[in-house]
Amino acid sequence: MMCRRHFFLLLMGMIPLGNAGCGPADAANGKLRVVVTTTIVADAVRQVGGDYVTVESLMAAGVDPHKYTPTAGDLGKLRQAQLVLYSGLHLEGKMADVLEKPVPGRGPGKAVTASLTKDRLRFADGGHAPDPHVWFDVKLWMTCVECVRDELAQADPTHEAEYRANADRYLKELAALDLEVHRKIDSIPKEKRVLVTCHDAFWYFGSAYGIEVNGLQGISTAEELGVNDVQELAQFIGRRRIPVVFAETSVPSKGLAKVLDSVKSVFGFEVAIVGGDDALYSDALGEPGTPAGTYVGMVRHNVDTIVKALTK
């Protein structure tokens, strides 16, 4: 596998050669060829694109996008794409430099979060780093779905009516999901609405649905985990007598285990950890064909898991 720096140099030099003469649809099957970065974006494109798109995701289920290292095979996918969509807000790290580069016959890739105004976003690290985990507020993700709709319609105007019809149907489903999440979280007693996870991915979720959140690492899992991070979270859990914390499917839970050891040592009580099949999905969906393999299914899995654990 080539190193990240060499991949970017190769891609920057070669990708303009791709797509020369490409039409609005894949000549092989008449479908628009869309390449995306994450499984979450891929699901949005499939929901809106329906039978008129072919979607390829650079990242598979369970892959942490913060730490993703592009492969040589990604080069071919990006060169052959007729539309490139990515999450944005630095979720993909340095890949954004390549994804934003214009390509003759196609133009630059598009961040589905591009239409979110600053007042709707959270900024960490002294206000410099945007929190990219906007999909945990269903209403924010609805705005991203509208961006997907518009980009598909622009890239393939022949099927604009179909894209808009699919988007209308899906947006209604998401509006109902937003109400469902509110109802389920409201069923948790207020004093128990505290969500502790491996990294700071759930702020939008907490802000939208009224639950306090705290993560061991920052908004990016690429950040180094320090001793102070472990001690601070252990103090928070110990002082608040938090009974349960949640592992994440795409993030190792070793650091969280250290926190719980510290809580037991200092405060003298054990904290349960929700993991395994019940771990929360944060930066990636579940395997295709599973309930959490779609955005709607992922949200439901997380909410049902949280409600079940916090109402015990």
Image: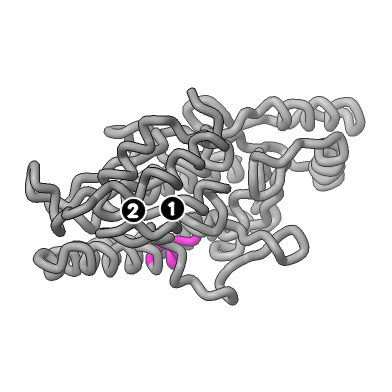
What residue is shown at x 87% (from left), y 40% (from top)? Answer: 228
Determine contact: label 1, label 2, CB under 8 Å.
yes
Question: Magenta stretch?
Answer: 137-142
Amino acid at pointer 2: Val
Helix or strand or loop: what does disc 2 sit on? strand
Compared to 141, does 278 lie above or below? Answer: above
Image quadrant where residue 161 sits: bottom left
**Tally of numbered tags:** 2
Query: Label 1, label 2: how many angstroms apart (C-alpha)?
Result: 7 Å
**Residue 7: in sight, yes or no?**
yes
Q: Quadrant where the C terminus lies?
A: top right
What residue is shown at x 66% (from left), y 39% (from top)? Answer: 222
What residue is shown at x 85% (from left), y 43% (from top)? Answer: 232
The stretch drawn in magenta includes residue 138: yes
Left or right: 237 as drawn, with respect to 203: right
**250 and 147: which is toward the camera:** 147
Residue 45 placement (x, y as % from top left): 28, 53
Helix or strand or loop: what does disc 1 sit on? helix
What residue is shown at x 41% (from left), y 30% (from top)? Answer: 72
The crowding category of the residue bearing disc 1, from other C-alpha atoms within 10 Å (few below 14, some 14 to 19, many at least 20), is many
Image quadrant where residue 103 sits: bottom left
Left or right: 39 as drawn, with respect to 127: left
Mark nearer the N terminus (1 vs 2): 2
Residue 98 placement (x, y as % from top left): 47, 50
| Magenta segment main secondary structure | helix
Residue 208 placement (x, y as % from top left): 55, 65
**194 and 48: which is toward the camera:** 48
| Residue identified by numbered label 2 | 84
| Residue identified by numbered label 1 | 99
Amino acid at pointer 1: Leu
